[in-house]
Amino acid sequence: MTETEMIDFLQKKTDQVSENSNVSEEYLDEAGFRCCKVCGKRRENEYSMLGKIFRVRCLCECEQAEQKRIQEEQRKKEFALQVHALKSVGLTEKRFYEWCFDNDNGRNSKMELAYSYVQKWPQMKEKNIGYILWGEVGTGKSFFAGCIANALMEQGISVMMTNFSKILNELNSRFEGKNEFIGHLVSYPLLIIDDFGIERNSSFAMEMIYHVIDRRYCTKLPLIITTNISYKEMTDPEMDEEHQRIYSRLFEICIPICFEGQDMRGGEHLKKREVFHQLLQ
Ligand SMILES: [Zn+2]
């Protein structure tokens, strides 16, 4: 840009700003600068360049505040869109949307662990700590998991909440790309598998379930599972090897929480639980 072009550019910019400004809210001070009637601050600055003096439009305090407000509003809108997109992908059933802390009636004391999980999410993620929520139907396990999912997504964190029927349907419908699908599934910062039940599955299904859990285990990212299977069943020493290897993986990364009022104090996963309880302090 030559000097003349630069002068022209600045002059045009100044003229343009003058056209756009709301003169009715302004007055001229002693030096002839346009000032805002509300905050009393100048809306023009003076610059000298190449022997010429230019007055360039600037924002007064109220205009700066308004600009900040508009930017903040825009940021909020964009964030809301991002959360909406996360939920539309990560909440695979409509009812999952309802399972949020706003709908917690406060009657289930176990919910404290859901609140803490969200509060301590960075540490839970780093230490790869998840939950196995077990208990009978209607004890609030899925609600608990859904609350965590919604709350994290509302912070912009990507979560996938699904179940094995959906995962198996997807895998069955694919001739190719099974590995890619599982790879994508296990890459979510938090994976929640609702309503986990593996007692009546085919060998193919069992293989796939193990594959998903094992891949998740290898990613070192947390997993939350809800199930109606009792802790006793899950830790039954008589269990066949196929089931045993699935549960053994699960218990390595998930803290069991009972939704039937029983206290879980097994000896086998004390180390992980100790870290978990330290995190909650
Ligand atoms: Zn002002």
Image (tube, helix red, strand yellow):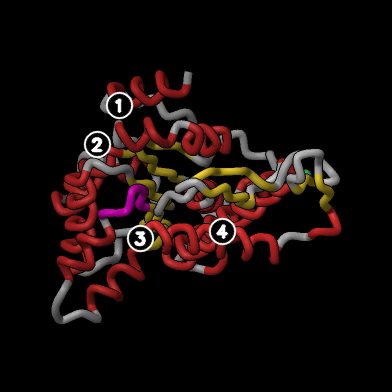
> Do the CB atoms of the residues marked 2 and 1 lie less than 8 Å apart?
yes
Q: Earlier in the sequence, mark 4 or mark 3?
A: 3
Q: What residue is rendered at 38% in x and 49% in y? A: 225
Q: Residue at position x 16%, y 54% from top?
A: 242
Mark 1 = which residue? 272
Q: Is mark 2 within 8 Å of ligand 1?
A: no
Q: Is residue 122 left or right of residue 39?
A: left
Residue 140 visible within the image: no
- For the residues labelled 3 and 1, the Cα–Cα distance comes to 69 Å
**In the figure, residue 35 lies in which quadrant?**
top right
User: Relative to the observer, which residue lies in front, 157 or 160?
Assistant: 157
Cα distance, mark 2 to mark 4?
36 Å
Which residue is drawn at the image coordinates 72% and 41% (left, top)?
61
Q: Which residue is mark 4?
A: 80
Q: CA distance from mark 4 to mark 3?
A: 45 Å
The nearer-to-camera label among 2 and 4 is 4
Q: Amino acid at mark 2?
A: Glu
Q: Residues within 10 Å of mark 2 (few under 14, many from 20)?
A: some
- Disc 2 and disc 4 in contact, CB within 8 angstroms: no
Judge depth for marks 4 and 1 and give the one in front: 4
Residue 234 visible somewhere in the drawing: yes
Estimate the spatial distance between the alpha carbons at disc 2 and disc 1, rounded to whole Å: 8 Å
> Which secondary structure lies at badge 2?
helix
**Pointer 2: what residue?**
252
Ligand 1 occupies quarter: top right
Q: Tell me where the magenta segment starts and ends, as one range.
A: 187-191
Q: Tell me if mark 4 has few (under 14), some (14-19) or many (20+) residues whose alpha carbon lies within 10 angstroms of its own.
A: some
Q: Earlier in the sequence, mark 4 or mark 1?
A: 4
Q: Name the chief secondary structure element in magenta.
A: loop
